[in-house]
Structures are given as structure tokens and as C-alpha cells.
């Protein structure tokens, strides 16, 4: 996997994806999400990636807090990482990560699914006008 410098934080996303591939190669599909999350923590530590897990962000409706959402990982303080262990990623999961990126006021998010035969990932970029690009 080579780093494509056209994409913001591509060096970090490449490391994250490589760590996820290592975990998926070891376990394959079929485990609950928490197993992949814990294994990914070990991979991040081994590869020198700084991360926070289970970060909670308040959700507001017209300046009134109405709840909160929790994201699986915030990597290097700039990439939101959401994990799934489902048989297929749907538009629901795409909407979910986009909402999380907005709520956390970030630009880049990765959605990684361990539930398929091959690891599947999708990169989302939200610019300052809330336009989305997915790769």
C-alpha cells in the first residue's frame, strides 16, 4: 500500500488500514466488534499510533444538549475511526460516520468493517462547506 499524498492525512490512514488488515488477517470475520477493537488497540500501540477510544461527544439541538454519541477511536487527534463487524456496509453506516465527523468537528473519518470475508474500509472527507468525498 502506497501513500497517496493527494488525500489529507493519508500517511496516518495508511497506517490505520495496515493495522486493521493485520487484525483481519489474524481473526478473519465472525467475531463481535469489541474483539476487533481490542486487537486494533494492540496494533496501534505496536505501530506507534496515538489514539483515544470510546470518545463521547455531546449532541445538540438548537443549542440544547439532547444526548451524546460515542466513537470507537480518535487516531492522532485528527481521524475519526468507526468499526463495524457486519456482513454488509449500508448507507446507514455511511450517514452515521458523516454525522460523527460533523459532531466532532473533524475532516477525515474511516469506516472499517471486519465482518466481511475481506476487510472493507471507506474513507470520508468533510470539507468546511460540509461537502463529502468518500474513497
Image (tube, rainbow, N blue to C red):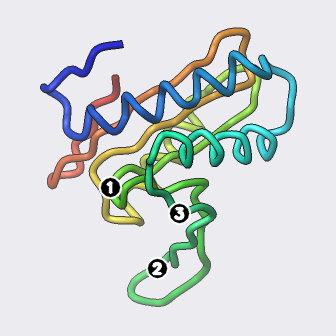
- Position of residue 40 measured from the top left corner of the image (x, y, whole percent): 64, 41
Q: Say what secondary structure mark 3 lies in.
A: strand
- Position of residue 15 measured from the top left corner of the image (x, y, whole percent): 41, 32
Quadrant where the C terminus sits is top left
Q: Residues within 10 Å of mark 3 (few under 14, many from 20)?
A: some
Residue at 45%, 38% in the rendered image: 110
Q: Mark 1 points at which residue?
A: 78
Q: Say what secondary structure mark 2 lies in.
A: strand
Looking at the image, residue 119 sits to the left or right of residue 50; the answer is right
Looking at the image, residue 8 sits to the left or right of residue 78; the answer is left
Looking at the image, residue 16 sits to the left or right of residue 56; the answer is left
Judged by depth in the image, the label closer to the viewer, 1 or 2, is 1
- Position of residue 88 measured from the top left corner of the image (x, y, whole percent): 69, 20
Residue at 75%, 28% in the rendered image: 86
Above or below: residue 108 compared with residue 115: below
- Residue 52, labelled with which disc? 3
Q: Say what secondary structure mark 1 lies in.
A: loop
Amino acid at each position: 500500500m502506497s501513500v497517496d499524498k493527494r488525500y489529507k492525512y493519508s500517511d496516518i490512514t495508511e497506517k490505520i488500514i495496515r493495522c486493521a488488515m493485520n487484525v483481519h488477517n489474524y481473526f478473519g470475520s465472525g467475531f463481535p466488534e469489541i474483539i476487533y477493537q481490542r486487537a486494533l488497540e494492540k496494533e496501534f500501540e505496536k505501530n506507534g499510533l496515538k489514539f483515544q477510544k470510546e470518545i463521547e461527544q455531546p449532541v445538540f439541538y438548537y443549542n440544547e444538549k439532547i444526548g451524546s454519541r460515542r466513537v470507537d477511536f480518535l487516531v492522532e487527534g485528527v481521524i475519526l475511526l468507526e468499526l463495524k463487524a457486519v456482513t454488509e456496509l449500508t448507507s446507514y453506516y455511511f450517514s452515521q460516520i458523516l454525522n460523527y465527523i460533523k459532531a466532532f468537528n473533524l475532516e477525515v473519518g474511516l469506516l472499517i468493517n471486519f465482518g466481511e470475508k475481506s476487510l472493507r474500509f471507506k474513507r470520508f472527507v468533510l470539507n468546511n462547506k460540509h461537502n463529502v468525498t468518500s474513497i
